[in-house]
Amino acid sequence: MTLRTTLDFLLHDWLSTTALTERERFADHSRDTFDAVLDTCERIAREKYAPFNRTVDTEEPHFDGEKVILPQATYEARKAYAESGLLSAAQDYDIGGMQLPYTVEAAANSFFAVASISIGSNLLTSGNANLLMAHGTARQKEVFALNEFNGRWSGTMCLSEPQAGSSLSDVATRAVPDGADFESDPLGPRYRLTGNKMWISSGDHELTENIVHLVLAKIPGPDGKLVPGTRGISLFIVPKKMVDAQGQLTGVRNDVALAGLNHKLGWRGTTNTLLNFGEGKFPVDGKPGAVGYLVGQPGKGLACMFHMMNEARIGIGMAATMLGLAGYYASLDYAKNRPQGRPVQGPKDAAGASAVVKDAAQPQVRIIEHADVKRMLLAQKSYGEGALALNLFCAKLVDEQHTGEAAAADEARLLLEVLTPIAKSWPSEFCLEANSLAIQIHGGYGYTRDFPVEQYWRDNRLNMIHEGTHGIQAMDLLGRKVLMEGGRGLTLLAGRINATIERAIQVPALAAHANALGAALQQVGAATKAAWATGQPADALANAVPYMQAFGHTVLAWVWLDLALATLAHDAALAQPASVGRMGSMRYFFHYELPKIGAWLQVVSTRDATCASFPEDAF
């Protein structure tokens, strides 16, 4: 079953995406236009991305003293992507967009991610521009966002610092008003920034005319000191090259200097940088500091940045998913063609024990005929296709939030809040495990660079770290999302899950699975209450990651049960191999994966302090 077959089922038979065309915003579209977009992206990914995935892995970015050098294939791929219009696919017609549903845009982007995640990392540019469309001034939208959407410029997000990775409270980059008339600049209140930012993806390159950095920094108070914590953080547009109020390059370089390239385990085709702001290498108007333009209100920068961060987190979940599926497709092909071993034979002896016999005179069988290889393939399939369904469901929630009736839009907003940590972290963990299984299926060959699966694993290992580490996502889920608005988001999600259970319990083939999901949902609810029984965050959050693993597995079991219902509605006789595959994946997940939640929730429910109380010197 191809990726396109899976996408078609998820978009049209499960999510009924074509029904969105009944809404005014999408009225010009149809199944035909959606298919045309997918066709175009599938072709570009096949021609411009997939053939060069190994090239960008081995020919890493390097700095020649003046500029960052990338393989020519990266330029060609980026040009084809920009010309496809995907950067502005979901934007309004009047700014050059297609007004596509975000669900279709996410599905279309999956082709690039599965072909080459290193080349296909255009995520930050779209997220950067979307943030500015939500929080920027009219001129900031026109000058910066629109030039990102049309592919002329690219964008980044600059949060972390060498001394403050995930701890944004410790951001030390300073922003001071640029003169007495700093508020009169047409591009926004003008500041001078000094500081260092670390782990900046696509932080320097020559792929576009300009790079638009969105930078978190603190404005000093009247006493010259930075406000402690996150409440003092503001957000600034800091272009690599200075521009005028009409968006034309002035020929002046902003004081943003590349301090170094990070040499990564994976995603080697994308530059990752340490940037120095305001070090004096490129002084503007002879004054110190990189020029930046305030976005939104002073001290409200983190709230603005979360608009981009949440979008990026769903994008990271999709990246992890597609890497997992890339490994699955590769190992499936290998398993179908690699002969090794012979089937186990032999009757039971008089005592009733089986005598394992292999007839060496018989020809070898392909490894896909071995039960354990099928187990590993089923695990990959259930992880990858389940995660893809979850991410597209979240994308559909985005469309519902933006175009649905008020009550439905608010419900979509809250569901998305609860599901975002899962959509980012569950694929990052379990599609990475899928990549590990892909290596295992290849055996020793999988550990070599002669086959692509080792690169998929290396590329995927990043996804548990960036855009909020696994532990941070877990604390966000248990510490904020399931509690917010009096637990209404968790109640809404439970309602959706129970609705699926009620439908599935009426289907004999699914009734046992429906009951298992109901029991799992009860366990998650009880564990949530038990975790917070003392009211002490330290007690509850000590086991936040096991909680998130159990929560995620329950959500994925729900997704698979809902997919099973859609499969039977589409093909009741299970006459199509794809239908048989989905039903088998659902059974695998319920039989092999869902039972794991008991062990995870045990430590959550008892507020086990083994890890939290372990003395440092005992290590």
Image: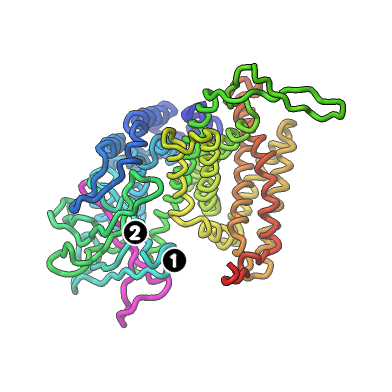
Depth check: give the residue in front, 408 or 129: 129
- Hey, what amino acid is under mark 1? Ser
Compared across the picture, whether 385 is left or right of 587 comes to: left
Residue 581 rendering spot, x and y as whole percentages: 60, 28
Compared across the picture, whether 182 is left or right of 405 comes to: left
- Reply above or below: 611 against 442: below
Compared across the picture, whether 273 is left or right of 619 comes to: left
Q: Badge 1: few (under 14), some or many (20 or more) residues near its Cα, within 10 Å?
A: few
Residue 266 rendering spot, x and y as whole percentages: 40, 46
Badge 2 or badge 1: first in the primary sequence: 2
CA separation in Å, label 2 and label 1: 13 Å
- Dot 2 falls on a residue whose secondary structure is strand
Depth check: give the residue in front, 356 or 171: 356
Q: Badge 2: few (under 14), some or many (20 or more) residues near its Cα, within 10 Å?
A: many
Residue 158's tag is: 2
Residue 50's tag is: none
Q: Write down the quadrant of residue 513 in the picture.
A: top right
**Magenta stretch contains residue 230:** yes
Residue sitting at 38 percent across and 60 percent down? 304
Q: Which residue is mark 1?
A: 167
Tag count: 2
- Hey, what amino acid is under mark 2? Cys
Check if mark 2's residue and mark 1's residue have beta carbons within 8 Å.
no
Residue 373 rendering spot, x and y as whole percentages: 60, 32
Residue 139 rendering spot, x and y as whole percentages: 24, 55
